[in-house]
Amino acid sequence: MKPNFDLSGKVALVTGATHGLGMAMAKALASYGATLVVNGHTPSKMEAALAEYEKVGIIAHPFLFNVTDALTVDQAIGRIEREIGPIDILVNNAGMIQRTPALEMDPADFRKILDVDLVSPFIMSQRVAQSMINRKSGGKIINICSMMSELGRNTVSAYAAAKGGLKMLTRNLATEWAKYNIQVNGIGPGYFATEQTAPIRVDGHPFNEFIINRTPAARWGNPEDLGGAAVFLASSASDFINGQILYVDGGILATIGKPVGE
Ligand code: GCO
Ligand code: CA
């Protein structure tokens, strides 16, 4: 039997899919037949995103809402279910980073990052899973983790704490909901060329060279590099995979790195 990667007839909701990695994964899911629901929270970004999806022949259903508020999420998912259909695939991609040394980090900012990067995937997953359980459909939840689910780095204390937490949330939800045929997995992107990394990717920035040297593939990832992992974990080809984090990192986590110039 051929493994089945087809997503037709499935409704996929990708949070923060107005740009960057979220958009690349959303395009991949739609290209395998999923009906695409795009979440964002900035009207102008959503407008630009819809034009971008249209350009590649994808009909995206836009839903603007804040993923950190449980009541808002409850209402928005209800509306998506009525207007588009019950959600089969949830990609918790919306996230936020702040690069500030730990000693200078305002605890209120720390809390805010945790809220967006860790609490909101919990809120979204809880709401969507409850509905999958009620209709006995099973389903797929994919949490977008990070290199920082495994490694620390100067200036990203809150982000690393949240992404490490998201890895464990993934394992925990996988444990609790496996009996409902819900698979909860994560994707851990390495260093990708997106808006989020633009400030540390500029030519001449020491971080740019550091990443190229640190990555066995010797390059930044392109957002399209994530498509295969997203389709795989969203499809029935991965039905016996649960609680895993699939790192798409050009080999970074496999190695200690190498001296400059080698
Ligand atoms: C940083 C980066 C990272 C990446 C990514 C790595 O400042 O180190 O922005 O956090 O975006 O999450 O996997
Ligand atoms: Ca359906």
Image: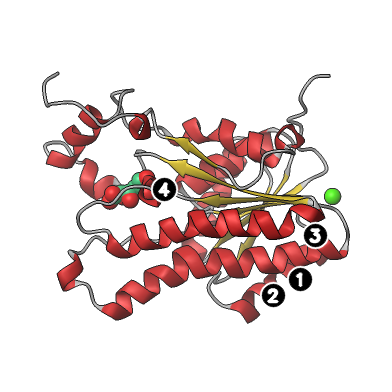
The CA distance from mark 2 to mark 4 is 27 Å
Q: Is residue 230 something that shows in the picture? A: yes
x, y percent for residue 170:
57, 55
Tell me the CA gap for discs 4 and 3. 26 Å
Label 1 or label 3, whichever lies nearer to me, is 3
Work out whether mark 2 precedes mark 4 in sequence or the reverse, and give the earlier one: 2
CB atoms at circles 3 and 2 under 8 Å apart? no
What's the distance in space between the residues labelled 1 and 4, CA to CA?
29 Å
Mark 4 C-beta closer than 8 Å to ligand 1: yes
Q: At label 3, which amino acid type do we have? A: Met
Disc 4, disc 3: CB below 8 Å?
no
Residue 63 placement: quadrant: bottom right
- Which mark identifies residue 252? none
Label 4 sits on residue: 146
State the SS at label 3: helix
Going by the numbered disc 2, the residue's amino acid type is Asp
Residue carrying label 3: 132
Structural crowding at the residue carrying mark 2, measured as other residues with C-alpha within 10 Å and reported as few (<14), some (14–19) or many (≥20)? some
Residue identified by numbered label 1: 78
State yes or no: Cβ of the residue under disc 1 lies below 8 Å from any atom of ligand 2: no
- Rendered-image quadrant of the C terminus: top left
Do tag 2 and tag 4 residues touch (Cβ < 8 Å)? no
Q: Position of residue 58 (x, y in %)?
A: 66, 40
Q: Using the image as rendered, state which of residue 224 and residue 3 is in the foreground.
A: 3
Mark 1 or mark 4: which is in front? 4
> For the residues marked 1 and 2, what is the alpha-carbon distance in whole angstroms?
6 Å
From what the image shows, is residue 6 above or below residue 66? above
Whole-percent x, y for residue 162 in the image:
41, 62
The residue under label 2 is 74
Return the disc, 1 or 3, that comes first in the chain's sequence.
1
> Quadrant of residue 66 in the image?
bottom right
